[in-house]
Image: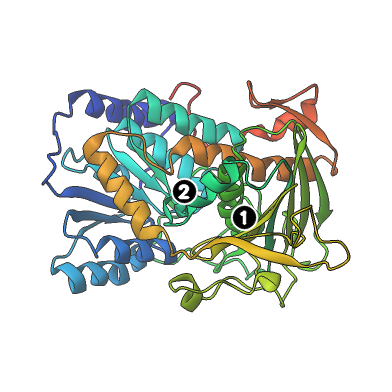
Amino acid sequence: MKSINRREFLKGSIGAATVTTLSRKKIIGANDKVILGIMGVGGRGVQLIRHLMKRSDVNIKYICDADTRRYGRAAEVVVEEHGYKPKFVQDFREMLKDTEVDAVVNATSDRWHALGTIMSCQAGKDVYVEKPLSLSIWDGRKMVEAARKYKRVVQVGIQNRSGPAIENAVEYVRSGKLGDIYLARVFNMMLHSPITKAKEAQVPEGIDYDLWCGPSPMLPYRPGSWWQGLWDFYCGAIPGDLAHQMDVVRYLIGKTYPDTVSHSGGVFYLKDGREQPDTQFATYEFGNLTLLSESALWAPYMHKIPGSVRDSDQFPNWQFTSTKVEICGTEGFMQFGRHGGGWQVYAAKKSSSGGGWETGTQENELIASEYSRQGTDNNIENFISCIHSRKKSKADVEEAHLSTLLCHLANISYRVGNRKLKFDGKTETFLDDAEANKYLKANYREPWVIPDEV
């Protein structure tokens, strides 16, 4: 791809995309197939293609990746399931020019989520974008602004919102049956391997390295996942996973912005050159409700919920479940497992006379529960439905922004020395803290820059 300056970029891509939005006249009927372009076909991108290929009402016209070597595996899935081969384009802007494309599935890494989504909205495309939503708080807000300005459906891969058990759990918490809620906890405890930093090497044939780096610095090429330890490329291994639990807990307790955030932790175990912490304990104050987030990458005894449990009438082993949410009320205690773990509520056992709590027994009783299933297929179903109806989706971009923002807040507290920070939700800035405010926006590289006016 030839080098272009910022003015040419804006004129040739973002500007042209806006024109496409204004001139696009295709109206999707209820029985029409939704034409898709897939942006990014690493592991998650191929998984989403497999989910999409379960459906007869979508057609994948384009597969796009900066690395041409990834095309074959992704295309094979479409051929096996539907018998046709999508077109491959290395530069995603090519598929944005196609007025037949209704929506883009953005399964790139963190650095491309914001700009790829914004440009797709400007081109008149609806978007399904993976989590974590953004590389910074400012980026996430710009994604929301683009979705609203261009009237696009932007669904995010926080699929727990589409899970079969979440609505009843939310209703239970909001009903007051747990009593007054003063504490909620989220967990992301597990074991990760160190990041291997290979030696610098020549860029392999088939990779457009400028496009691959995109908004992030164009550092010397190294094989592997070296970039996952750098702020300019990645939110961190903890937020990358924790974004799911943060969205679940925020949905359950019905909160938006915290008043304060404070972080404790650092890089204690995985001393592999990473910039993000491997130990992260964050405290958020929402008035009289405190949210505690406990995350670490050195806990081999904590495990994600097995697939055999996620899609069955079983509950996980809560004690050693690494990705759970707990809601603590004055009358009851809820445990919720993401991605199919279901939920259970316990309360102290009442006395047989009905005159209050049992004393001395320390016994609890199960008073409510519900099995669940994984929510990806439901999330995609909701996305396709909203493309037709033009309604706001369940996992809407603004909900994902507010949930991902909590992860960014913890990171920023860490970056300024684990200080307690006061946050103003109206402006999405820190109060009287210039140092913390420096981290509200990612350091994007020209020409891959998000404009102030999207």
Query: Residue at 63% of width from left, 61% of height from top?
Result: 324
Query: Residue at 72% of width from left, 45% of height from top?
Result: 411
Q: Position of residue 14 (x, y in %)?
A: 35, 30
Disc 2 residue type (three-letter): Glu
Q: Relative to residue 183, is residue 417 drawn left or right? A: right
When asked about the image quadrant of residue 124, the answer is: top left
Structural crowding at the residue carrying mark 1, measured as other residues with C-alpha within 10 Å and reported as few (<14), some (14–19) or many (≥20): many
The vertical placement of 87 against 93, above or below, is: below
Q: Nearer the viewer, residue 332 or 424?
A: 332
From the viewer's perspective, is the residue at label 1 or at label 2 nearer?
2
Which residue sits furthest front? Answer: 353
Q: Which residue is the site of mark 1?
A: 242
Disc 1 residue type (three-letter): Leu
The CA distance from mark 1 to mark 2 is: 20 Å
Q: Nearer the viewer, residue 7 or 79?
A: 79
Q: Relative to residue 88, is residue 156 drawn left or right? A: right
Q: Position of residue 253 (x, y in %)?
A: 62, 42
Q: Which residue is the site of mark 2?
A: 167
Q: Do we see residue 194 in this rendering?
A: no
The vertical placement of 153 against 158, above or below, is: above
Query: Residue at 54% of width from left, 68% of height from top?
Result: 223
Q: Do we see residue 202 in this rendering?
A: yes
Q: Position of residue 254 (x, y in %)?
A: 59, 37
Q: Position of residue 440 (x, y in %)?
A: 66, 33
Structural crowding at the residue carrying mark 2, measured as other residues with C-alpha within 10 Å and reported as few (<14), some (14–19) or many (≥20): some
When asked about the image quadrant of residue 152, the answer is: top left
